Amino acid sequence: MSAGNREGLTDPNTVLLCPTDEVLSTGSPVLVVIRGERLGARLDISGGPLVIGRSSESDFRIAARSVSRTHCRVSQQGQSVWVEDLGSTNRTFVNDEVIDRRQLRDGDQLRVGKTVLKFLGPDNPEAHYLAEMHESSIRDSLTGMYNRAHAMQVLEEEFRRSQRLADARLVLAIIDIDWFKQINDEIGHLAGDAVLVHLARVLGKALRAGDTLARIGGEEFALIMPDTSLQEAHQACDRLRQRVADESFLTDCGKRLEVTISIGLAEATPQMTEFRELLGEADSHLYDAKTAGRNSVRSRAA
Ligand SMILES: Nc1nc2c(ncn2[C@@H]2O[C@H](COP(=O)(O)OP(=O)(O)OP(=O)(O)O)[C@@H](O)[C@H]2O)c(=O)[nH]1
């Protein structure tokens, strides 16, 4: 977004911070997608039985016609892990053999439709490597935040959940830095990058458990807030906006800046048919926030 002029970009007090590395935990048996959509996604089996299927109620959903609504179930029994076909049309395969029920062994490949998942026992060293590969594929390299692709996947899943469960509310916030082009033009692209990194840290620190924050564009972020009402989200985002406005940002060349953000919100409603409607509504409220002068939060409620 852009328009108008901004004054007082620099401010003399700030600290530049870097994103922290996230520790990747392995240690329990997992299934890792090695072919198909969501490559690298991990299913932790230790948390209880998992149903794989096309239905939105599945624990791991594969949206393909070759996959039955409830295709197979994977469960841990004592130290062993079992897979059981649930009467699927196109059958379940382990290492290319049709199975009804079978114990999974380290390195086995489970095929459901065209998706292949590799079973890795708790001590398999490949698990850590695959976890790191997956982690880097869902992160933005500059800020360390989740990237757009991951945000869209989380948003779609949370949207489906909110449609399925009557009391599961969902709010999406689109956060956009104000006058960012001016920061780049006046101080330089590296300064702009430093602001993005610092902002990622400020937003990340304010995150509540269950929320997902991602960088979805150059200077645009998405905050996905499940189980939150529009009013609660509006208040939380206004606190976030204030926190950013109070922060002092340091650029690569030692200049200090005041930075503000504008936020547009949208809440999932039963009338919506797909998650992109949330993006459209949040974007339109973001536009309202920009035209109302920036450094503000806008939603259907206000
Ligand atoms: N430094 C840096 N700049 C980026 C990056 N990605 C996008 N940008 C810049 O972000 C700026 C976005 O500018 P506009 O869309 O005009 O928005 P704006 O200046 O923030 O104006 P408003 O949103 O209307 O307040 C452009 O100058 C892009 O080049 C990046 O990764 N690093």
Image (cartoon, helix red, strand yellow):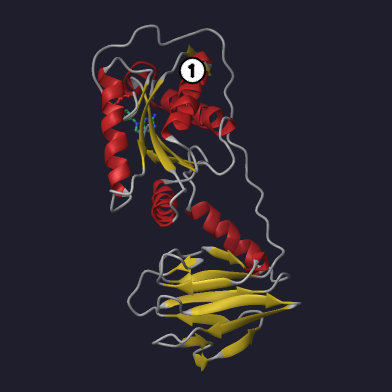
Q: Position of residue 193 (x, y in %)?
A: 44, 29
Instruction: Please rate how many residues cluster around mark 1, counting C-alpha atoms within 10 Å: few if below 14, some from 14 to 19, many from 20.
Output: some
Asked if residue 282 lies left or right of residue 103, the reply is: left
Q: Position of residue 101 (x, y in %)?
A: 58, 89
Q: How many marks?
A: 1
144 vs 238, nearest the viewer: 238
- The residue shown at (46%, 22%) is 238
Check the picture and name the quadrant holding the C terminus: top left
Residue 252 in view = no
- Residue at left 28%, top 45%? 277
Q: Nearer the viewer, residue 32 or 206?
A: 206
Q: Where is residue 180, by image quadrant?
A: top left
Amino acid type, residue under disc 1 in the picture: Gln
Q: Is residue 252 above or below residue 26?
A: above
Q: In the image, ligand 1 is in what quadrant?
A: top left
Q: Secondary structure at mark 1?
A: helix
Q: Is residue 64 above or below residue 180?
A: below
User: Is residue 202 something that shows in the picture?
Assistant: yes
Q: In the rendered image, which residue does mark 1 sit on? A: 242
**The quarter of the displayed image where residue 48 is located:** bottom right
Q: Is residue 189 left or right of residue 203?
A: left
Viewer-proximal residue among 185 and 87: 87
In front of the other: 140 or 38: 38
x and y, in percent, of residue 46 in the image: 68, 67
Is 296 positioned to the left or the right of 243 in the image?
left
As displayed, is residue 299 above or below residue 123?
above
Please identify the residue farthest to the front as the structure is shown.
166
Q: Position of residue 202 (x, y in %)?
A: 54, 27
